[in-house]
């Protein structure tokens, strides 16, 4: 898959896939592997991103940046959006986020703030450097808070912000936000899904099973719920129902990694 396809895949599954990363995968995902030696900021981000580009790609971006330097105020917004779009196409979500953020600082648009936040969050999913990961988390929290300041009823932004807080130094703040959303919007399948992950993370598998069943009741097409339902059922020792859940995911799931793992579980359950 090329870089543009990879970014598109990350953004498409951000709400579910990133939630799975934050609440379900081991905390060691953010253990330092190659920690940054330079202060993290726009210059660091663009230098690192450009080092991964082909020469012609970097040249085209440099030309746009030179034009941007000649603009001021609202005249900068079309160029900022264009640069963000180009970085998206190149599969560099953090660089794209930086430009969406610059545009948001001028136009105070909830969409621009949200575009930036979503990309910081998408980049966090693939990050294994704890220093850069912490910075990405900080940026996502800042931008989602801006979205909510503009539109307090943006439920998706609130849930993503809650996920961020759950991974920050204020985990209970995120947990309470998710619970409040679920109480206010009991038919919101994403809120139920998130709480299901929380239950798995805390070892409350009965509650996790209840949450994932609720997700499927509200939205039968939310196939990822079958996978995580199967996992929770395995932990409870209900291998028959677990195998059924994994089979349903194998028939409708789209995430290649989860499909692979579901098949492994099914084969193991058959032999036990």
Image (cartoon, rainbow, N blue to C red):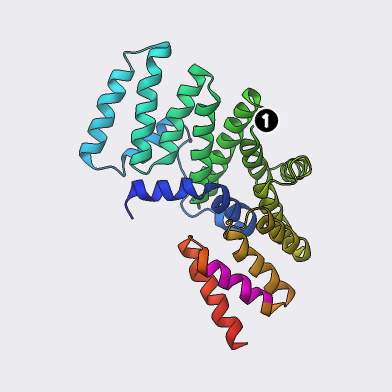
| Between 259 and 50, the one nearer to me in the picture | 259
Q: Which class describes the residues within 10 Å of circle 1: few (<14), some (14-19), or many (20+)?
A: few
Can see residue 268? yes
Residue 45, image quadrant: top left
Q: Position of residue 15 (x, y in %)?
A: 57, 47
Residue in view at x 70 percent, y 71 percent: 233
Q: Secondary structure at mark 1?
A: loop
Left or right of 122, for residue 189? right
Q: Position of residue 197 (x, y in %)?
A: 67, 56
| Between 201 and 148, the one nearer to me in the picture | 148
Q: Position of residue 25 (x, y in %)?
A: 60, 59
Q: Quadrant of the C terminus?
A: bottom right
Q: Position of residue 82 (x, y in %)?
A: 35, 27
Residue in view at x 36 percent, y 49 percent: 5
- Give the vertical position of 70 relative to 223 (above or below): above
From the image, give the main secondary structure of the stretch colored magenta: helix
Q: Residue furthest bottom?
A: 271
Can see residue 25? no
| Between 71 and 178, the one nearer to me in the picture | 178
Q: Which residues are magenta?
A: 241-250
- Give the vertical position of 1 relative to 133 (above or below): below
- Give the vertical position of 160 relative to 26 (above or below): above
Residue at the spot of label 1: 153
Left or right of 262, for residue 211? right
Left or right of 226, for residue 40? left
Residue in view at x 73 percent, y 64 percent: 209
Instruction: Please tell me whether residue 178 belongs to the stretch shown in magenta.
Output: no
Residue 38, image quadrant: top left
């Amino acid at each position: 898959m090329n870089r543009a396809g990879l970014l598109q895949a990350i953004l498409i599954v951000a709400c579910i896939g990133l939630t799975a990363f934050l609440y379900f995968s081991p905390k060691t995902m953010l253990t330092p592997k190659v920690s940054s030696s330079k202060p993290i900021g726009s210059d660091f981000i663009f230098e690192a991103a450009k080092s991964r580009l082909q020469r012609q790609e970097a040249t085209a971006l440099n030309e746009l940046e030179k034009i941007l330097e000649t603009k001021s105020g609202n005249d900068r917004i079309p160029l900022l959006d264009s640069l963000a779009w180009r970085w998206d196409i190149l599969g560099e979500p953090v660089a794209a986020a930086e430009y969406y953020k610059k545009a948001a600082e001028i136009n105070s648009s909830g969409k621009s703030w949200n575009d930036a936040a979503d990309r910081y969050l998408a980049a966090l999913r693939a990050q294994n450097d704890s220093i850069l990961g912490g910075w990405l988390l900080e940026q996502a929290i800042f931008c989602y808070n801006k979205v909510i300041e503009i539109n307090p009823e943006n439920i998706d932004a609130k849930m993503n912000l809650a996920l961020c807080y759950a991974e920050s130094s204020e985990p209970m703040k995120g947990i309470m936000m998710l619970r409040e959303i679920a109480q206010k919007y009991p038919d919101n399948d994403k809120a139920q899904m998130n709480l299901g992950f929380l239950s798995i993370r805390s070892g409350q598998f009965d509650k996790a099973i209840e949450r994932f069943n609720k997700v499927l009741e509200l939205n039968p097409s939310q196939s990822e719920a079958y996978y995580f339902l199967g996992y929770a059922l395995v932990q409870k020792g209900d291998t028959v129902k677990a195998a059924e859940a994994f089979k349903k995911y194998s028939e409708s799931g789209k995430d290649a990694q989860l499909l692979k793992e579901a098949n492994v579980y099914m084969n193991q359950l058959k032999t036990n």
